[in-house]
Structure formats: structure tokens, C-alpha cells
Image (cartoon, rainbow, N blue to C red):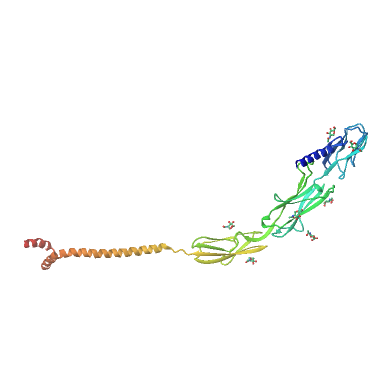
Amino acid sequence: MCGGALNGLLLGLLFFGVRAGSEDHPLQLDPASVVVRHRDPVLVNCTTSRYHEGIGWEASEGSVNTIEGVQFVTWRLDYITDWEIGPRCYGSFLNGTDQILLRITLYKPPDSVSISVVNHTGPMKEGKQYQLQCEVQNIAPVQYLTVKWYKGETLENQTSYDDLTKTPVNVSTTLLITPTSADDGAQYSCVAELELGPEGPQPSPEVKSDPLSITVVYPPSFHSPGNEALKKTEGEEVILNCSTMGNPSPGYSWSSPLDQTDMTVTLTSLVPGTHIYSCNASNAHGSESKEFTVEIIAIVDYLPLIAGIVAISVVIISITFFFIYCVYYKNTKMGRYDLKLGMSRTQNAHVAQNGRDSSLPMKKLTQPSLRV
Ligand SMILES: *[C@@H]1O[C@H](CO)[C@@H](O)[C@H](O)[C@H]1NC(C)=O
Ligand SMILES: *[C@@H]1O[C@H](CO)[C@@H](O)[C@H](O)[C@H]1NC(C)=O
Ligand SMILES: *[C@@H]1O[C@H](CO)[C@@H](O)[C@H](O)[C@H]1NC(C)=O
Ligand SMILES: *[C@@H]1O[C@H](CO)[C@@H](O)[C@H](O)[C@H]1NC(C)=O
Ligand SMILES: *[C@@H]1O[C@H](CO)[C@@H](O)[C@H](O)[C@H]1NC(C)=O
Ligand SMILES: *[C@@H]1O[C@H](CO)[C@@H](O)[C@H](O)[C@H]1NC(C)=O
Ligand SMILES: *[C@@H]1O[C@H](CO)[C@@H](O)[C@H](O)[C@H]1NC(C)=O
């Protein structure tokens, strides 16, 4: 295992030596490869440290005739235009001729990147499939192009190309989407990015399309689906909430006797019992309805009852006391009466005899004295 790694290392060093060593390859390019934008200037030196009988450049643009007695020869263009250009440096040495090809990449960011919906205009329906198309115009070289699709900031898909065409091409990619209600207002965009590697411009050139906002239409749907049962006590406020989500905004209708067109209905004075209401939310794409069963529980008003009981109790207690008082008083009074009665009777006898009340005290005083 260790030997394998060592072999690899040695092989790598050997390979590097062959590629870079001046001993084996008499001609060298500086830089060894170029990435240049179309119509930009370019300059590459071809150098040699060997004795030669002439070195030069051969290219469709900017060829340099062989020159003797120099250590380098420069290939230079103020602006490069030939997409297919393949410059090579050559030299005549004692053991023969040598040549080296320049690895050159001409690139051009796209003139435009645009996004459209294929065969469709206007709002999209929830759940249906649509095709978005991104058109990238005049891009080169397409083999380094990546077209990325974004929904908002999220990467949705990406496409790259293996076509080796060096000249600018038009490409288009598609993205299939099946929008949901949550995608209403979503912004799609596509980005054409040229990934030209470490020798290329940093960051990679990219052109972004204008965003495409989509409108998604969908039928109403309840925040809380299913019929609702509400239990309230008499006098309590009852709110019937028929709120739905829908695009365009749904219209509402309530069954008789409400006959309203509001999203929510507030009822305040329902009589005890069970009430059933239904609402219907609808827009151009569908409708949904919901039934509300409202049970109103009667409150028994205890106050008059308590007041009545208290009143009756007071009356009963009063009567009872009166009775007790009467009986007791009568009893005690009669007891006393009996004692006095004896005296009174004698007195009364005299009174009766005398026939005058005023004489009674006199008789009271006189009588004991008479007895004594
Ligand atoms: C000339 O010699 C060099 C190094 O010795 C070698 O790399 C090159 O290939 C030779 N050229 C020819 C044409 O044989
Ligand atoms: C080419 O060589 C010339 C002269 O030595 C030097 O000034 C220039 O910087 C070199 N260019 C590159 C790209 O190496
Ligand atoms: C778009 O519509 C045209 C004509 O109506 C049709 O020929 C074409 O196939 C459609 N394209 C797609 C992708 O559906
Ligand atoms: C790309 O499309 C544009 C506009 O349709 C057109 O002018 C141009 O010639 C096309 N380029 C290629 C390489 O087809
Ligand atoms: C994403 O791209 C791949 C390859 O380009 C394609 O096969 C796939 O269908 C695309 N997905 C969508 C959702 O368009
Ligand atoms: C009705 O319900 C919706 C969704 O739950 C809520 O946003 C809204 O505030 C409610 N309306 C009332 C009046 O309670
Ligand atoms: C709701 O009302 C719409 C329009 O008035 C009607 O077409 C639809 O049938 C109703 N839906 C229900 C479930 O009652």
C-alpha cells in the first residue's frame, strides 16, 4: 500500500518532469494555457533555452515568422476573434523541429438570458404542470456552461452541456413545474454560468434572467376543514368563521336566515337550543361549504328564585315567630293574670258594686284596711 503510494508519487514527479522539464521539451509557453474573452487582447511567450535555427508562431491570427538568435518569441493580439484559433509555437533544433500547441479557451458571456412559460400565458392553475423555458443566447463555449434554475433563492435544477462547439450557440433548457397554492407569487429565474476553471476569470461570469413571477389560482379551502360544532351558553357571543384560502379571494354566502356575505358572522342573541348555519365560499375555480351547529345552553336565572325563597322564608319565619310569641306571651300573661285575677276579681266585684272606676284605688286602699 505504502509502495503503491510511493510509486504514484514517483510517477507523478516523472510526469511533471516530462511536462515541465526544459531538457525534454525544448519549447515552453508562458503562460502554458490561456482563457481569454472573445475580442480581448492576448499575449503568450514561447521560450527556449536551447540553441536553435529559428523559433516562431503559427496561428490564424497573429503569426510570427521564425526568428533566429532569440530566447523567446511573443504571440500577441490586440483582440482575438477567431473562435477556432489553435496557435502553435515551433522551432528548429539540431536534432530536428519541435512544436507546442497553446491550450486556449475563448469565451463569451451570453448576450441575453430570458425566461418564459411554454405555450401559456396568464395565471397558472394549482396542480397542473407547466413548462418554463430559459433561453441563453450567444454563449461560448457551451461545454463550460451551466444553466441553473432558481425558485426565489432555492436551486431547483441545473443543466450542463457536453457539446464541444467552440463558437457561440443558443441553448434553451426547460423546467417542469406543478405549482401549489404556496407558489403563488413565486419568482423563478435562471442563471447562465460559465465555469472556466482556475485560469478563467474569478468569479465565474454569470448572467441572470429577469425573474418570472407566477400567479397561481386555486379554489377556496378551509383553514380548518370539516363541519364545526360550537357549544355556548345563552347570551354568549357566537363567532362563525368561514375563513378560507383561495385565489382569487373567495366570496362568501350564508344560509338563511343569516343571508350574509361576510367571511365571519357574529351572533349575539341566540335563543337556547340547536341552530344550524352553513356558509359557502366560492371563487371561479371552485367552492367549499361548511356547516356550523351551534348549541345554546339556557342559563337558569337563580336570582329571582333566591329572592323568592328568601322572601317566602322571611314570611314563614315571621309567621312562626309571631306564633311563638303570641303563644308564649299569652301563656305568661295568663299566668300573671291568674295571680292578679284573684285580687282583680275582688276588686272588680267592688268596682261592679260601686259602678265607678275612679273609686277603685280608694277601695284598694280601703279594702286591706278594712280587712285588717
Ligand atoms: C530533440 O531532443 C529533445 C531532447 O533531447 C527531445 O525532447 C525532442 O523530442 C527531440 N526532437 C526530435 C525532433 O527528435
Ligand atoms: C513575455 O516575455 C516578456 C519579456 O520577457 C515579459 O515582459 C512578459 O511579461 C512575458 N509575458 C508573459 C505573459 O509571460
Ligand atoms: C406549443 O403549441 C404549439 C402550437 O400550438 C405546438 O405545436 C407545440 O408542440 C406546443 N409546445 C409544447 C411544448 O407543448
Ligand atoms: C441565437 O438567437 C438569436 C435570436 O433569435 C439569433 O439572432 C442568433 O442568430 C442565434 N444564434 C445562433 C448561433 O443560432
Ligand atoms: C432536472 O434536470 C434533469 C436533467 O437536466 C432532468 O432530467 C429533470 O427532468 C429536471 N427536473 C425538472 C423538475 O425539470
Ligand atoms: C378566522 O379564522 C382565520 C384562520 O384561522 C383567522 O386568521 C381569522 O383571524 C379568524 N377571524 C376571526 C374574526 O376570528
Ligand atoms: C356555493 O356557491 C356557488 C355559487 O353560488 C355554487 O355554485 C356552489 O354549488 C355552492 N357550493 C356548495 C357546496 O354549496
**Which residue is most to the top?**
69
**Image spot of residue 98 (x, y percent):** 90, 38
On-image quarter of the C terminus: bottom left
Front-lying residue, 142 or 260 = 142
Please indicate, yes or no, whether residue 306 appears anywhere in the rendered image: yes
Asked if 328 appears above or below 12 in the picture, the reply is below
Q: Residue at x 40, y 63 (%)?
A: 304
Residue 85 is left or right of residue 296, and the answer is: right
Q: Is residue 266 left or right of residue 53?
A: left
Q: The N terminus appears in which quarter of the rendering?
A: top right
Q: Position of residue 72 (x, y in %)?
A: 88, 33
Expressed as whole percent of the image width and height from the top left, the position of residue 362 reads 10, 61
- Compare residues 194 and 103 and report the one nearer the observer: 103
In the depicted structure, whether residue 211 falls above or below residue 41: below
Q: Is residue 134 left or right of residue 25?
A: left
- State which image quarter holds ligand 3: bottom right
> Where is residue 367 drawn, in percent x and y?
8, 62
Q: Quadrant of residue 58?
A: top right
How many numbered marks appear? Answer: 0
The answer to whether residue 139 of the structure is visible from this angle is: no
Task: Give the image quarter of residue 104.
Answer: top right
Residue found 26% across the figure and 63% down from its top: 325
